[in-house]
Image (cartoon, grey):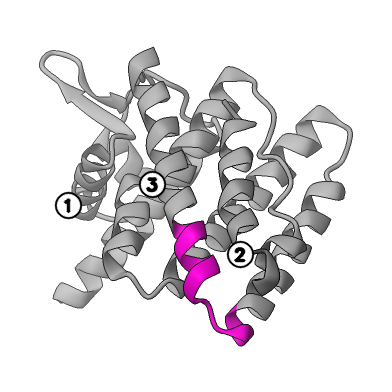
Amino acid sequence: MIQLKRNLTEHAYLLVRDRILRGELPFGAGLSRRVLAGEMGISIVPVGDALQRLESEGLVESRPRVGTRVRIPTAQAIRGHYVVREALESQAARMFAATAAPEQRAEILGLAAQLDALFADLPEAEAERRERAFEVHRTHMRFHMRVAECTGCDELCRAVERNQVLVFNWLYDAALGGPPPTGCLRPRATDPRRRCDFGKAAERSSLRRQ
């Protein structure tokens, strides 16, 4: 029973988060546990747990006499998340460049090539581009998470996951009409002969999006 509840909570969490990130639930949109539960065909308990998790991550907020809604970020919060993202990704890149094994470098090279190909294949039509860019973003996030995992630093991985920095960046880009993430770090960045370049490339990738 406990495992079933966890699965339903995870299911509700992912559905609501995706709807927020896709712009289906815009900033300030009300989130009724009963309505969401009815749409998903589940009880309100796992929906409530999912909303609490989203609130702890900063995607939704609860206010007296207002209820639960998609969080409306302040300019300061947006700037802060870009700062955190830059710091985490740059540190992960430096550690990767210094410690990654050859097979890990090859893996990241492959992921980088796949991601660059996805960016290059984005359609011109705005509606199609937005939908495809969301999927590219998810691949982009997995890429950076894999770089962090290859450092062998569990604390760094948890920090990246906990802060949901890339998720926040996508949310702000989509809501504010900005462009999708730029192309991935180039393959030469993982060349062991150019270790210092990987960290610099990560910093440039972050700064380009500010």
Using the numbered discs, state the Cα–Cα distance from disc 2 to disc 3 in whole angstroms.
Answer: 26 Å
Residue in the image at 58% along x and 32% along y: 207
Residue highlighted by disc 3: 164
Q: Could you say where residue 109 lies in the image, as x and y percent from the top left? A: 71, 70
Q: Which residue is situated farthest in the left direction here?
A: 64
Which segment did they paint magenta? 92-104
Q: Are marks 3 and 1 in contact (CB under 8 Å)?
A: no
Using the numbered discs, state the Cα–Cα distance from disc 1 to disc 2 in whole angstroms.
Answer: 49 Å
Residue in the image at 14% along x and 74% along y: 2
Q: Are marks 2 and 3 in contact (CB under 8 Å)?
A: no
Up the image or down, 46 lies above or below 85; here it is below
Up the image or down, 124 lies above or below 194; here it is above
Mark in the foreground, 2 or 3: 2
Tell me the quarter of the picture where residue 143 sits: bottom right
**Image quarter hosting the C terminus:** top right
**Image quarter hosting the N terminus:** bottom left
Of the image marks 1 and 2, the number of the one nearer the N terminus: 1
Q: Is residue 96 magenta?
A: yes
Residue highlighted by disc 2: 195
Tell me the quarter of the picture where residue 209 sits: top right
- Image mark for residue 45: 1
Identify residue type, mark 2: Arg
Of the image marks 2 and 3, the number of the one nearer the N terminus: 3
Q: Could you say where residue 141 lies in the image, as x and y percent from the top left? A: 54, 54
Mark in the foreground, 1 or 2: 2
Residue in the image at 62% along x and 86% along y: 103
Residue in the image at 63% along x and 76% along y: 105
Of the image marks 3 and 1, the number of the one nearer the N terminus: 1
Whether residue 146 appears in this view of the structure is no
Dot 2 lies on which element?
helix
Up the image or down, 78 lies above or below 103; here it is above
